[in-house]
Image (cartoon, rainbow, N blue to C red):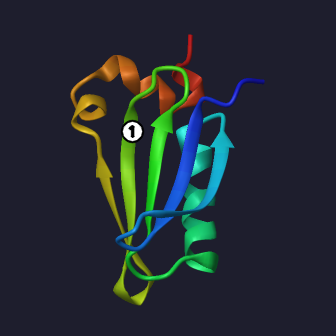
Amino acid sequence: MHRKIIATMFRGKKKEKVWTRYYSWMDTAMPRAVQLALQTGVEGDVIEFASVELGFQIGILRLMPKNRTELEVSPLVKHSPSLMKLMNPNMAG
């Protein structure tokens, strides 16, 4: 099975790579990346989600104070329903 989503955690202003993981679907990638971020991350860390096949950024998850997270979805994904198939395996054709 081909892994379509790459999640990479970066630390601090230097953007030092902490880890990289590959996932088949965004709905699998998001909860697992949040779990790993809360276990291994520190405030200010950023996780970038990107499409391996299409080569564009899907979104960024930021670790905020008090173990809160903030998700910023790429404008390209927000405005293109055809790209939403990355988000849900039931929509894949």
Q: Give the quarter of the image for residue 36.
A: bottom right
Name the residue furthest bottom: 66
Of residues 81 and 90, the one drawn nearer to the viewer in this rendering: 81
Q: Where residue 24 sits: x, y (%)?
A: 66, 34
Residue hosting label 1: 58
Q: Please tell me whether residue 1 is drawn above or below residue 29 in the rendered image.
A: above
Q: Please tell me whether residue 5 is drawn above or below residue 63 in the rendered image.
A: above
Q: Where residue 2 sits: x, y (%)?
A: 72, 24
Q: Where residue 68 sits: x, y (%)?
A: 39, 78
Q: At 61% from the left edge and 68% from the top edge, which residue is drawn?
A: 35
Q: At 27% from the left edge and 22% from the top edge, which residue is drawn?
A: 80
Left or right: 82 in relation to 40: left
> Number of callouts in the render?
1
Left or right: 63 in relation to 16: left
Q: At 37% from the left edge and 53% from the top edge, which residue is drawn?
A: 60
Q: Please tell me whether residue 38 is drawn above or below residue 82 in the rendered image.
A: below
Q: Quadrant of the C terminus?
A: top right
Q: Amino acid at mark 1?
A: Ile
Q: At 42% from the left edge and 63% from the top edge, which residue is drawn?
A: 15
Mark 1 neighbour density, 10 Å: few (under 14) some (14–19) many (20 or more): many
Left or right: 58 in relation to 86: left
Name the residue furthest top: 93
**Secondary element at tag 1:** strand
Q: Where residue 84 sits: x, y (%)?
A: 40, 27
Name the residue furthest right: 1
Q: Quadrant of the N terminus?
A: top right
